[in-house]
Amino acid sequence: MSFLSFESLSAYWSANEVSVNFVIFMNMVGALFLGSLVGYERSYHGRAAGMRTYGLVCMAAAGLVAISGYPGYWYAGQGAVGGSTDPTRVIQGIVTGIGFLGAGVIMKEGFTISGLTTAASIWASSAIGVLVGVGFYAAAVLLAVLSASCMMWMIKVENWLPSHQAIAIMLRFRQGYDPQEARLRQIAVDRGYEIAGGSLNISFVEGQSEWRFVAVALGRNRGALLSELARELAQFDGVVKFDLAHARN
């Protein structure tokens, strides 16, 4: 039978193939939910990786593991699985290589991290490619839809749920000025923030004290806006330079 014949092509959409694709789809939906649940805990505490990152990685990993349980359905049962070339080794190489590619788009500047969701989406797209490659077209389409939906709408769900906004702050004080940590913490509390434990970093630059830390909002909509904080810092006598940015992107 020719691989280009109607019978060969229709085998990819046979009842058995579609049922296996549906099982894989349900596995991926469950993984997306559970991964997003774990990611919400990180997002709630103002961490860099949130619901979208965890959901995408968990979902893609579930898809890759699920297809390994149905080797007889790969290529609609027409491939030579178990022959001289083991497809699982190819999959391992793809996942590893894409992991390095994804790491290249993650950027960290101070306490600000960007590119995590992009890296996760790249890894998820590799899982889509693997699904297409082994003939699980329906599962690949559904994974693509889930991934796009996760990236477009999960951020809205994440913003709607209770969370703690995190801000990365750098303060450089004028020479001779002696900042007090207790007073700084109280100033943060008065504006709806608290300094995250273990985030305080103090250094000296050209004879001036420079403090870097992450301030986490005490609750949703309780922290002052960045523009308000910037206006106050611009008028603060002891500060000669400052930098404010959201601690996660």
Image (cartoon, grey):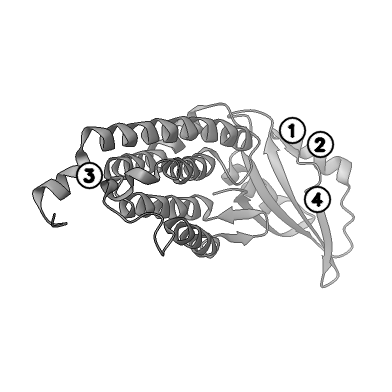
Residue at screen point 53% across, 52% down: 116
C-alpha distance separating marks 3 and 1: 63 Å
User: Which badge, 2 or 3, is on the more N-terminal residue?
Assistant: 3
Could you classify mark 3 by the number of other residues whose Cα lies within 10 Å: few (under 14), some (14-19), or many (20 or more)? Answer: many
| Residues tagged 1 and 2 counted as in contact (Cβ below 8 A) | yes
Q: Which mark is residue 190?
A: 1
Q: Amino acid at mark 1?
A: Asp
User: Which badge, 4 or 2, is on the more N-terminal residue?
Assistant: 2
The residue beneath circle 4 is 200
| Residues tagged 1 and 4 counted as in contact (Cβ below 8 A) | no
Q: Give the percent coordinates (x, y) of residue 235.
A: 69, 51
Q: Which mark is residue 148?
A: none
User: Which badge, 1 or 4, is on the more N-terminal residue?
Assistant: 1
Q: Amino acid at mark 3?
A: Tyr
Q: Amino acid at mark 2?
A: Gln
Residue 204, placed above or below residue 198: below
Label 1, secondary structure: give it. Answer: helix
Among all residues in the image, which is located at the extreme left? 6
Query: In what quadrant of the picture does the N terminus appear?
Result: bottom left
C-alpha distance separating marks 1 and 4: 18 Å
Residue 188, placed above or below residue 244: above
Q: Give the percent coordinates (x, y) of residue 68.
A: 45, 45
C-alpha distance separating marks 1 and 2: 6 Å
Could you classify mark 1 by the number of other residues whose Cα lies within 10 Å: few (under 14), some (14-19), or many (20 or more)? Answer: few
Q: Give the percent coordinates (x, y) of residue 93.
A: 49, 63
The residue beneath circle 2 is 186
User: Which badge, 3 or 1, is on the more N-terminal residue?
Assistant: 3
Closest to the observer, 218 or 105: 105
| Residues tagged 4 and 3 counted as in contact (Cβ below 8 A) | no
The residue beneath circle 3 is 12
Label 2, secondary structure: give it. Answer: helix
